[in-house]
Image (cartoon, helix red, strand yellow):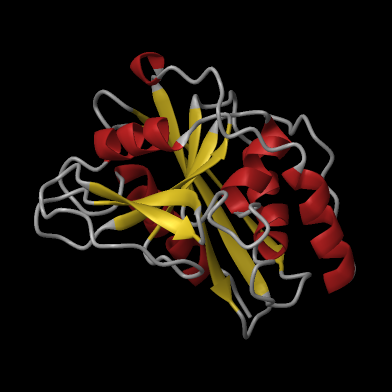
Amino acid sequence: MEPVGELRQPRSVEEAVAEQRRLRGLVRVEGAFDVSRWRTAAGVDVAYDDEAGVCAAAVAVLDVGSLDVVDSVTAVSRIAFPYVSGLLAFREIPAVVAALRQLDRAPDVFVCDGYGIAHPRRVGLASHLGVLTGVPSFGVAKNPLYFRCDAPGEERGSSAPLMDGAEAVGRALRTQTGVKPVYVSAGHLVGAEGACAVTLGLARRYRLPETTRVADRLCRRVLRGVGP
């Protein structure tokens, strides 16, 4: 699949911040995404080898009924942007897009290991990717990073809002009873409620959605095979 938007690669922090502000104007967190009709979900994850200066991206497409992998693609890219808090997407997007171009067809939804609008400028990797592809997307993070929230209830499915001042930017979601929550944020064309429903549908046995677990294993395996 080819991106529907332009992939812009900033050359400086100032250009990257300006690009995020442009993308923010294109993000739509509420869309026509019908949770009852989704059939495939793609996990997106990136692993780094900072010493070699490369990263490996993996996109794993799962059938949501069986959780079987129906397609998977990977790509390795040189890291072309420095590590700057809030600008991580610019280190990852080139490899992710290179992997996406190998997909035969777009999934119904992208599930990113990271953030959507739970981001200082409301444009984490999930929002960036969603605008670029036109595919509904959201983020599932392991830690709240930028924001804080009250602990959700202990039962599976319990949630609590992730707040930036008075604005809710995501939810802490308990995917398994008594297990640490994950942090779900809308990315593009899907709201928080839909994102949480999809996450629970993909996290039937473990804390993380199966899409994330498969993509994580895949990109790490690829990175181990990259030479110096």
In this view, the residue farthest toward the bottom is 51
The answer to whether 217 appears left or right of 157 in the picture is right
Q: Position of residue 111 (x, y in %)?
A: 46, 42
Residue at the (62%, 86%) spot, across then down: 51
Q: Quadrant of residue 60?
A: top left
Q: Is residue 208 above or below residue 28?
A: below
Q: Quadrant of residue 94?
A: bottom right
Please state the total of marks drawn on the protein image. 0
The answer to whether 19 appears left or right of 26 in the picture is right
Q: Position of residue 204 (x, y in %)?
A: 18, 40
The answer to whether 132 appears left or right of 180 in the picture is right
- In the image, 178 versus 75, the foreground residue is 178
| Quadrant location, the C terminus | bottom right
Residue 70 appears in the picture as rendered: no
| Quadrant location, the N terminus | top right
Residue 91 appears in the picture as rendered: yes
Residue at the (75%, 36%) spot, across then down: 26
In this view, the residue farthest toward the top is 37
